[in-house]
Image (cartoon, rainbow, N blue to C red):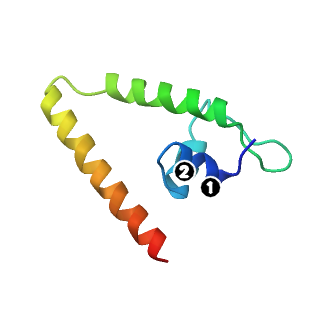
Amino acid sequence: MATQTEVARHLSLTDRQLRRLQKLPGAPISNKRGQLDLDAWRDFYISYLRRSKNDVPDGDSEDDYEEKLLIARWELTAEQAVTQQL
């Protein structure tokens, strides 16, 4: 069992991104103490990423998807740097 921050760090997400994922149907729920199952969250996040990849419209090429993913990673890295400075 892990805290929300530990799960987010494990998945390379921010706490806010994890909270958004928690609102999705099928997301693992915490136990009575607020602890999250790390393995369940890893499985859920992998399936979420696979579903998201399959939802790419036909008009977008694979290169566009890769570019968007790269931009999202840069933004995430920038957010994490700001968080570490606080």
Kindly report the distance in space between the C-alpha atoms of the residues bearing marks 2 and 1.
Answer: 6 Å
Residue 9: give x, y in percent of width and height.
54, 50
Disc 2 vs disc 1: Cβ atoms closer than 8 Å?
yes
Residue at the right extreme of this rendering: 32
Vertical arrangement, residue 38 with respect to residue 58, above or below: below
Q: Quadrant of residue 30?
A: top right
Q: Give left or right: position of 77 versus 47.
A: left
Q: Which residue is mark 2?
A: 9
Would residue 16 be found to the left or right of residue 49 on screen?
right
Q: Secondary structure at mark 2?
A: helix
Near mark 2 (Cα within 10 A), the count class, few <14, some 14-19 or many ≥20, is some
User: How many other residues sit within 10 Å of disc 1, few (<14), some (14-19) or many (≥20)?
Assistant: some
Residue situated furthest bottom in the rendering? 86
Q: Quadrant of residue 77?
A: bottom left
Residue 28, percent from left and from top: 67, 34
Between residue 12 and residue 71, name the one nearer to us.
Answer: 12
Q: Is residue 63 left or right of residue 38?
A: left
Residue at 42% over, 30% down: 49
Residue type marked 2 = Arg
Instruction: Tell me which residue sits at (86%, 46%) in the image.
Output: 32
Residue to which mark 1 is pinned: 5
Count of numbered labels shown in the rendering? 2
Residue displayed at 56% across by 49% down: 8
Side of 66 where 28 appears, left or right: right
Q: Secondary structure at mark 1?
A: helix
Residue type, label 1: Thr
What percent of the width, then of the height, locates residue 67? 18, 41
Residue 60 seen in the figure: no
Q: Is residue 67 above or below residue 51?
A: below
Q: Which image quarter is the N terminus in?
A: top right
The answer, for residue 82, to whether it is visible in the render is yes
Residue drawn at (81%, 42%) of the image: 31
